[in-house]
Image (cartoon, grey):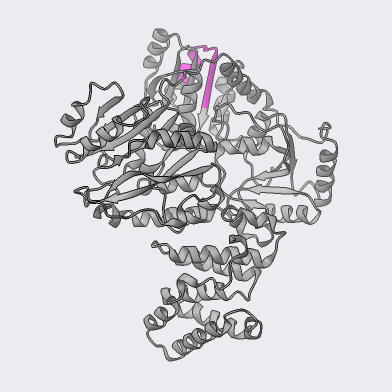
Amino acid sequence: MNWLLVLPHPDAPTCGTTFTYFNYILPLQKLLGNPVKIDTTASVDTLKDIYKNNQLSFVIEIINNTPSKALQEFQKEINLPSTAIVIDRDTTYESSIYQYVNNVWGKHESFPNIIPNGLYHPHYREYPKDKRYDVTYIGTATDGKAQIISHLIKHNVNINVWGYGWEKYKDLRLVAHGYLPHYKKQEIIASSKISLNFDNLSTNYSEKALEILLHHNTLLNYSIEDNSIGRLVNNINHLLNNPDNNSSVEVPNTESVFNSISKLYTSKIDSKDISENNTDLSIICYVYNQEKFIEQMIISVLGQTKKNFELFILDDGSIDSTADIIKKYSHDPRLKYKYQKNIGSKLDMFHKLIEISLENTSGEYVAFIGGDDIFVSNKLENQITLLQQEKADICYTDFKSIEENGKSKNIQMRSKFRNLESDKILRNLYIANFIYHPTTLLKRSLIEDLGGFQTPFASDLHFWLKAANHYKFCFAKDTYILYREHQQGSSTGNYTNSNGIEETLKIYQYFRTINTILDFYPELGEDNQNPTSIANAYTNLSSILMKNKYLLPAVIVTNSERALEHYPFSLSAWNNLIITFLLLGDKQNLSRALQFVNNIKENLQQEERYQEFEQKLAAALQFYETDEDNIKLLNYWMDTAENSVFQECLVGR
């Protein structure tokens, strides 16, 4: 079967963006086979020639806004049996894309006209048959939606919420989760008895379509203007008690379109037309001018006790003897080598180097190694064994740092990060990025599901934060890699240290914004909304943030303030808040905090270690009144920063 894929930049691995490649192009290629690729600027004549020479069965175009003019003209003349458009974002019915599809492609019914964002992922999955969620809502928070969900909770409706922005609503903090990968929506909705959609509050075509695609669950549309809360509660209760009665369910008229997607995917999978990997493990290495160390790396990989793998080396434009050294080992069929023009000289293209490497490899499992690092001989064999035994998705190991000359620096992973349970990975990543990507071995499907490595700097940190709440991590306790630290190293050199800080700060801040406190402390959901436990969780997180070398004062303040919303007498939260205001030199907010603490002194006096807190508080008041330089006082407070959580966090035990 031949098909044509129309792209903005067909020769670029990302085709414009990492998201587009991993979430549209790669799955479509797995489903339909390798396409003929052309640029959106192609002429009508070019399209006709391709059609004639390849006997095309499908034309698919990936677009952001409007289809290419040439394709529109081509479609009018050539009556292909099957056509489609994939769009990069949610689009409303009134958009030019939908008008174009209806006017030009509407007559073709053998293949879906359009695949909106949210329906792109054709990976076949066995979704759970049990309905573990009663009512589910997935979407971005707004005041109107929050008001409805709060009412449902008060009426004893068991509802679960996913999406961005919900944590700002105090009464929803123990029902709302944050970051949810697109593919995960399908699993969540399939596991829900009722999928709630607030249609007039957020016209989200993709979510409706997704729910229809999973046509075995109930879709309940709700408009705040058309229904009262009471009627909504009655409808939900009716559907929960009568799951086979869908009389009150409104289904948009696009059902046939998305059923055809489902049939296409299912038939393709049933026919087993998807190519199988011949190699179960791919080791990826991208290098630039590593003539000093590259041979040690190659020998350490080719000498592994596990023999069945491929080592792919992407040479990013080396101008030294790196290529010659690599070619010395070309007789080993496991070694694959690709040279390209340099794109990573500024050390800000790690995500693209990984993408290109993934494009050229096929293993079910993926491992990484720097051109200057060394694998211990049994690393790969032991990691795969452990990954399979633990039924995990990502395996990371301890490491030992070595100097440029190979001498040990005796630097290893901090003991607190060894063998963490998966539900504690997210919050511990906010202390430090303790998962060094050369130590890891992970499933390729995980990389594809999460849209690959996406950021120029700190690509690995960004990826671990995406994966933290959705995949199982396991730790191999032995030291399996010698990690070389030197001035020219890609992650240890001066250039990266000076340029990656801003990017790292953005990543930490972003994921704190899109994750909720329940994502960081899932055990909170078992505590029956105990306000002290919620406060302790926020305080514990703010203390963790204070220990990170990338300080995020605004985020620390937000978490401390949220802790005090639930329990205003937390000495730990006040301690962290005052330290941060001192650090910022923010005397206005400091004075407000000190004033409030004075007003609740009687309650605070009942807390443990208040006497120590009171001494520091008196010093802070004196500082404010005398306008003294805050450095001395800040140091006084920070003396106990590591012990700033005076009471053991209930949820952290």
Of residues 266 and 489, which is closer to you in this image? Answer: 489
Provide residue 417's location: percent of width, then percent of height. Answer: 46, 54
**413 lies above or below 598:** above
Provide residue 48's location: percent of width, then percent of height. Answer: 41, 12
Would you say residue 190 sits in the magenta stretch? no
Count the marks: how many? 0
Q: Is residue 21 left or right of residue 146?
A: left
Of residues 240 and 199, which is closer to you in this image? Answer: 240
The quadrant where residue 21 appears: top left
The quadrant where residue 20 appears: top left
Provide residue 611's location: percent of width, then percent of height. Answer: 56, 85
Give the farthest residue toward the left: 320
Residue 88 in sight: no
> For the point 39% across and 61% down, which residue is it?
550
> For the point 43% across and 24% down, which residue is it?
6
Q: Which residues are magenta?
A: 72-85
Would you say residue 84 sits in the magenta stretch? yes
